[in-house]
């Protein structure tokens, strides 16, 4: 996508060609792909790709016929919605920037003894994780994203060959009075180990959510200590144990901001599909379709959704297709938009139309 500074459409997320195509259609009642290509001086194939992108963003509408023609939507409403999504993205990015700068500023100051400790050995990291977990009495907060590290049996108290890096798929065991909350990155939640560890934690009382593009791996213990990797792309290269109250508070604020935007997912009831949630507006949507839409809103692909819900990929596609038919929507973005309008999806879900992570 061309978003260079000489592109007047850069602020909307549209590439330069899509912008020229939209400009042409706004000034004409309708036009065929061939007419648009001739008018903007671009290859027909590239223009058709731009038109499909604009359709997915709800900026242009196809008109049936031969040849098919295209019509621009009212700019104030269609572009207004697109700009609102971009503003939400920028607001979320600014929030993360401030939180991360606070962490950077605190970490850059001279370290008081025992407030920040570097752990360069994997066995030491696993032992410290187990020690902090055993000493936790109130809550454990967990951000999990790839790449994961496969540890030896029993590492971090997780048992046989679990992925035991503190930012990986490992999920602590439930204890009475200990609240467990985990947010998994949807990009890494695609294999059997990730699913099994999340299922184990969810079934034993943990709360589980999904989000896209998590900024960091992190585990917080009773809001008094935290573990995070020294290098986000190389979790086996060591970890930081943080006990600085100000820094731990900043990390906890980061977790809560992500938790608030993440999509709740219930895994322990996927076989019997309980009654519809009371928090939703009354609709005719069934519980299985609701679960599929929730996961789809996080950016999950069909294969991953099927694995999470223990159903076939064909079943996932059937429910998505039926939801699209019921909503009068053709693309997944349109399904998400209209499902959110109906109250089937929360507007803050990572890939719902008004969220910072939505995909135009």
Image: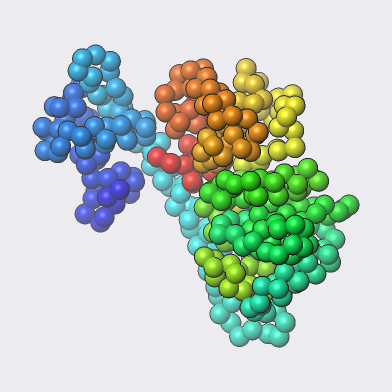
Q: Is residue 332 left or right of residue 211?
A: left
Q: Dividing the image into 4 quarters, which one contains the C terminus? A: top left
Res. 289 visible in picture: yes
The picture places residue 118, in percent across and down from the top left corner, at: 64, 79
The residue at 16%/30% (across/down) is 36
Most extreme residue toward the top is: 65
How far across and how far down the image is residue 49, in percent? 27, 35
Q: Does residue 221 appear anywhere in the picture? A: no
Residue 346: give x, y in percent of width and height: 59, 35
Q: Is residue 109 above or below residue 181?
A: below
Q: Nearer the viewer, residue 205 or 107?
A: 205
Above or below for 159 versus 238 = above
Height in image: 153 above or below 325? below
User: Is 25 placed left or right of 316 in the picture?
Assistant: left
Tally of numbered tags:
0
**Residue 80 image-quadrant placement:** top left
Q: Residue at x 62, y 62 (%)?
A: 149
| Foreground of the two, 53 or 223 | 53
Q: Is residue 157 left or right of residue 355?
A: right
Give the left or right position of residue 100, taking residue 168 as reference: left
Which residue is rendered at x = 60% and y = 69% of the image?
A: 236
At 21% from the left and 54% from the top, the residue drawn is: 6
Percent position of residue 146, x then y: 56, 57
Which color scheme is applied? rainbow
């Amino acid at each position: 996508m061309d978003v260079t500074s000489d592109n007047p459409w850069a602020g909307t997320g549209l590439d330069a060609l899509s912008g020229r195509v939209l400009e042409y259609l706004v000034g004409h009642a309708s036009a065929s792909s061939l007419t648009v290509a001739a008018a903007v001086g671009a290859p027909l194939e590239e223009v058709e790709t731009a038109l499909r992108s604009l359709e997915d963003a709800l900026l242009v509408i196809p008109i049936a016929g031969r040849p098919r023609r295209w019509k621009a939507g009212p700019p104030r409403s269609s572009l207004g919605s697109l700009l609102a999504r971009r503003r939400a993205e920028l607001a979320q990015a600014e929030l993360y920037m401030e939180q991360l700068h606070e962490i950077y500023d605190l970490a850059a100051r001279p370290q008081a003894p025992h407030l920040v400790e570097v752990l360069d050995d994997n066995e030491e990291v696993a032992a410290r994780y187990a020690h902090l977990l055993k000493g936790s009495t109130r809550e454990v907060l967990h951000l999990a994203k790839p790449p994961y590290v496969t540890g030896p049996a029993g590492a971090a108290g997780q048992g046989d060959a679990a992925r035991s890096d503190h930012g990986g798929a490992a999920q602590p065991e439930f204890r009475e009075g200990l609240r467990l909350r985990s947010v998994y990155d949807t990009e890494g939640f695609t294999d059997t180990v990730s699913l099994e560890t999340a299922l184990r934690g969810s079934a034993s009382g943990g709360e589980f959510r999904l989000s896209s593009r998590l900024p960091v791996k992190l585990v917080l213990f009773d809001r008094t200590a935290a573990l995070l990797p020294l290098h986000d792309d190389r979790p086996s290269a060591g970890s930081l144990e943080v006990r600085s109250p100000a820094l731990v508070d900043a990390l906890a604020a980061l977790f809560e901001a992500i938790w608030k935007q993440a999509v709740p997912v219930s895994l322990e009831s996927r076989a019997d599909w309980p009654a519809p949630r009371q928090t939703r507006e009354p609709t005719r949507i069934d519980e299985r379709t609701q679960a599929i839409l929730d996961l789809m809103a996080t950016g999950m692909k069909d294969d991953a959704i099927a694995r999470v819900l223990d159903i076939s990929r064909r079943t996932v596609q059937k429910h998505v297709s039926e939801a699209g038919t019921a909503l009068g929507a053709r693309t997944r973005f349109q399904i998400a938009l209209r499902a959110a309008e109906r109250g089937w999806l929360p507007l803050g879900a990572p890939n719902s139309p008004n969220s910072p992570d939505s995909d135009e």
